[in-house]
Image: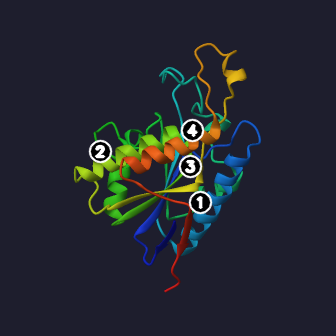
Amino acid sequence: MKLLYRDSNLTVISNLLQAPQAPDKQISGMVDESVKLAKMFCEMKWPVYALLDSHHPDIPEPPYPPHCLAGTDESKLVPALQFLENEPNVTLRCKGCIDGFLGSFENDGSNVFVDWVKANNIKAILVVGICTDICVLDFVCSALSARNRGFLTPLEDVIVYSRGCATFDLPVHVARNIKGALAHPQELMHHMGLYMAKGRGAKVVSQVSFATQ
């Protein structure tokens, strides 16, 4: 499917774009696509909302082991995306939980993402990031539920760019030697994440382009 938008009411959500632990083709491709989109949005001065995992070491998130702890390199953007830190159209949000929507809540009950959508009059969001079946899917499902309940007006479309998403690979022979771990076949889980997102009402696309006029 090819996605064509003619106005600035499409924006990009970058979810959990931290450096992978080892070279990975799917993850590298996700980063490359995210960088292309991010640069394009910044050139057009369109709003970007970037979520970074920044977990507290004393707040466990079972079944997941400690990861992306606040202040560590894992909680930072990959080098190719660190330019976002200096872009005026970019909102960076450190989140202390898997779900970026829930992670956007402040202590006073306000939600930075909800306020951002309303302030920028966002009608469609384009979601990219890692992991397709975990962080991306959780955020997409929460955003869709909030939209359906009227909390995200004027948001209409939640769009997931398949080539801009990726997940990790944990083969059976590796998981077998890790207590409590489940195998996580990368390609299968990536497509399951996309399938579930589409089933919940998101638009899943494999190409993105923008009209010049």
Q: Give how far across and how far down residue 200 sits, in percent.
A: 36, 47
Determine the residue positioned at 29% across, 45% down: 110
Q: From the image, tell me which residue sits under label 4.
A: 189
From the viewer's perspective, tell me whether residue 122 is left or right of residue 42. left
Q: In terms of image quadrants, where is residue 177?
A: top right
Q: From the image, tell me which residue sits under label 2.
A: 110
Element under label 1? helix
Q: From the image, tell me which residue sits under label 1.
A: 86
Q: CA distance from mark 2 to mark 3?
A: 24 Å
Point out the tag, 1 or 2, that comes first from the N-terminus.
1
Q: Nearer the viewer, mark 1 or mark 2?
A: 2
11 or 72: which is nearer to us?
A: 11
Q: Outermost residue, bottom direction? A: 213
Label 3 neighbour load within 10 Å: few <14, some 14-19, many 20+: many
Determine the residue positioned at 56% across, 61% down: 206
Q: CA distance from mark 3 to mark 4?
A: 14 Å
Q: From the image, tell me which residue sits under label 3.
A: 129
Label 1 neighbour load within 10 Å: few <14, some 14-19, many 20+: few
Point out the tag, 2 or 3, that comes first from the N-terminus.
2
From the viewer's perspective, tell me whether residue 131 is left or right of residue 175. left
Q: Give how far across and how far down residue 8 sits, in percent.
A: 43, 73
Q: Outermost residue, left direction? A: 149
Point out the tag, 4 or 1, that comes first from the N-terminus.
1
Contact between marks 2 and 3 (CB within 8 A): the answer is no
Q: Amino acid at mark 1?
A: Asn
Element under label 3? strand
Q: CA distance from mark 4 to mark 1?
A: 34 Å
